[in-house]
Image (spheres, rainbow, N blue to C red):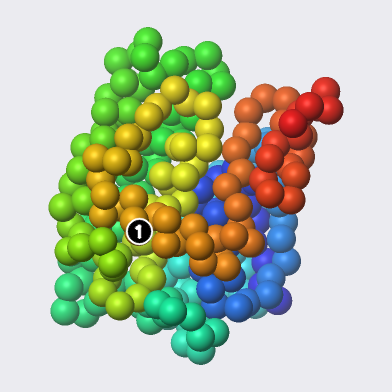
Amino acid sequence: MRALLFTTGSPFARAVRVVLSELGLDYERHEEITTPSADERAAATPTLQVPTFWDGDQTLWESGTIVEYLLATYRNRPITEPPLAMGAFRPDNEWQDKLTFSTIQTFGNSATIISQMKWSGIDAANNAHMKRSADRLTHILGWLESQLDGTTGGFIPDCVSMQDIFLAAHVRFVQARPLGIDLDLQQYPKLAELLVRLDDRNSFKTNPVWWWEPGVVGYQPDGTPIFEDGNT
């Protein structure tokens, strides 16, 4: 039995769901629109964070660990072009691949902190720490742009990598939410081209961008939020 516990708007969970789709794996969806109590969440993971993934007797949390496990465990994949990477990191480029991934996850962590703080009444424009987090996004995008060789590939040549998928999930998360942050992707043409190509994959289309703010009680099939007053 495979199952995934996740919060609806999480870009980390979206990346895991995209990989599950890329692998053609069925799983039970345990979906939460908002975060439950600490005690309820602790029943699934000691970090009090999701996603959490169950695969038989194996329980995993932290999105990168989950995807690394999926890539290593499920070697047979549906035919796609370009194909999904066979592993998380290349043996001959392990540390650079790990550095790229950790930098992308830092982008995602900063973005989700900004989002959470905004709905707590703290805006990035009026708080030094939040402004530093917003500035970090731009610096990371600039560095990631420099890591791409051209506009036809991703971070690992000739495939779609974990790095590509998580970056797309995080960037589209920022763009979808009303955070007051303009990533200005025109400055990063190689990244922009990569994201457009990923948007066109079935795994991304079937796992659309969702975002949450107070009052959201559900979503349209295309990911448009539904508010408790009935508006969309």
**Which residue sits at x=20%, y=63%?**
150
Q: Is residue 206 visible?
A: yes
Side (left or right) of 36 relative to 204: right
Looking at the rendered structure, the number of numbered marks drawn on it comes to: 1
Q: Amino acid at mark 1?
A: Leu
Placement of the N terminus among the 4 image quadrants = bottom right
Q: Quadrant of residue 194?
A: bottom left
Query: In this picture, is 179 found above or below 211?
Result: above
* Residue 83 in picture, x, y percent from top left: 42, 80
Most extreme residue toward the top is: 126
* Residue 43 in picture, x, y percent from top left: 66, 51
* Residue 135 in picture, x, y percent from top left: 26, 28
Q: Is residue 45 visible?
A: no
Q: Quadrant of residue 37?
A: top right
Query: In this picture, is 79 found above or below 143?
Result: below
Local SS, label 1: helix
Side (left or right) of 83 relative to 79: left
Query: In this picture, is 91 found above or below 13?
Result: below
Placement of the C terminus among the 4 image quadrants = top right
Query: In this picture, is 12 found above or below 78?
Result: above
**Which residue sits at x=52%, y=27%?**
178
**Which residue sits at x=30%, y=52%?**
191
* Residue 216 in picture, x, y percent from top left: 72, 31
Residue that numbered label 1 is attached to: 194
**Which residue sits at x=76%, y=40%?**
218
Q: Residues within 10 Å of mark 1 (few under 14, many from 20)?
A: many
Most extreme residue toward the bottom is: 76
